[in-house]
Amino acid sequence: MLQGFDHVAIEDRVYGDDFGQTQSSYAPLRLKDGRVVGIVGIDVLAVRLEETRWKVIKFCVIVFGVASIAIFVLAAFVRKQVHQPLTRVLQAASDLADGRPHHRLQTRRRDEFGLLADQFDTMAQHLSDRQRLRETFGLYVSRALADELIKGGKLPELGGTECVATVVFCDLSNYTRISESLSAPEVITLINEYLAAMSEIVEAHQGCLLDFTGDGIIATFGTPLPLANHANQAVQCALQLRQRLTRLNGEWEANGLASRWQLLGIDRLEMRIGIHTGPLVAGNIGCASRMKYCVMGDTVNVASRLENMNKDFSTNILVSDQVKIRLPAEVSATFIDRGILKVRGRLQSIGAFSL
């Protein structure tokens, strides 16, 4: 109370007296000149203070409860409006990064996430079309060639570039006679089985399949993509082609198809392979509306002639001396020298070797 003559003073605890349990506060009464002439005291019953305290606590609890519910509702709204669509976008982007561009968001929202989803679906569609183009294009040309042409980001142009590469010509012996003994569906089945098996081996050795000419296969090693050991890859590919045909003959023997040509006196299907390495021109020929990737030059002609010369030596694989000199010694040591051969339509002769 005495402190109340100087400044506002509030008791820090409840006191008991004849009036009951109270808590008091005091303030000075001052004149205009600042002199204190008295004090004002206020007593508040303790029970009123307790009631007020519980009212405050109750109010705080209510406010906290309402705020918690509001936060929960807001979080659910944010999750629905932000988290869920963001999660879908991230999942779709992950699928896209893993090479699966078929995921579509397909949202009807008109906010920022809706615009993002529309743009994402458009991008995914373009990537899906690009992948489908690559897969479809790869059915007509080598996958390596398809990837190289598509990766360039521009339309192919007419023209070519000169390089040194290895060309492989492969053909089946007696195919015309054999096809006469089979029905049209059987011919298609036979040639598809054969070409599928051979193509897989060519691509496994980083070769580029240029064309199928009936039962014939034309492949290059070292173009359109550079390949340091293209000659050796071509030779190893030829050896595996021959081995795979041996297994195919066993399969055709087992399913009875081989009996059709065995009646003609042909015990088994044989292949002829010619391989030559040298300079050539690789590029697109044709016109602006229709073009074809191919290789041209003397190297291509020599490989074709070597394939046909197998008939003269009753061999399966003939390679030129230009191939042999590029091979490891342990590989070329097994070759059989067939001498210097005159190539039809060519003035210069070549050295030939059989495997």
Image: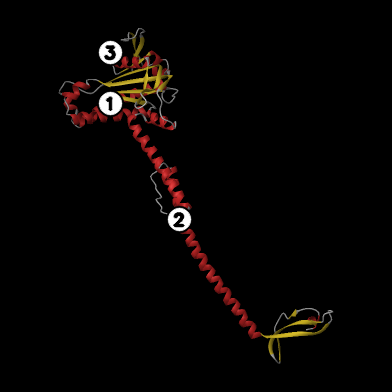
Determine whether label 3 and label 2 are within 8 Å by CB: no
- Depth check, mark 1 against mark 2: the one in front is 2
Q: Residue at x 64, y 82 (%)?
A: 49
Residue linked to disc 2 = 84
Vertical side of 325 occupied by 284: above or below: below
Residue type of the residue flagged with mark 1 = Leu
The amino acid beneath tag 3 is Phe
Towards the viewer: 66 or 170: 66
**Which image quadrant is residue 129 in?**
top left
Between 353 and 177, which is closer to the camera in this rendering? 177
Residue 112: tell me if it is visible: yes
Labels 1 and 2 touching (C-beta < 8 A): no
Give residue 139's quadrant in the image: top left
Task: Residue 4 in the image: state x and y as whole percent.
Answer: 78, 81
The residue identified by callout 3 is 313
Image coordinates for residue 239, horizontal then vertical, percent? 33, 23
- How far across and down, in percent of the image, does residue 318 sit? 33, 16
Q: Secondary structure at mark 3?
A: helix
Render colour scheme: secondary structure
Q: Is 201 in front, or is 161?
A: 161
Residue situated furthest left in the rendering: 263
Give the Cα distance between marks 3 and 2. Answer: 72 Å
Answer with left or right where residue 79 lies relative to residue 16: left
Identify the residue at image location x=60%, y=77%. Answer: 56
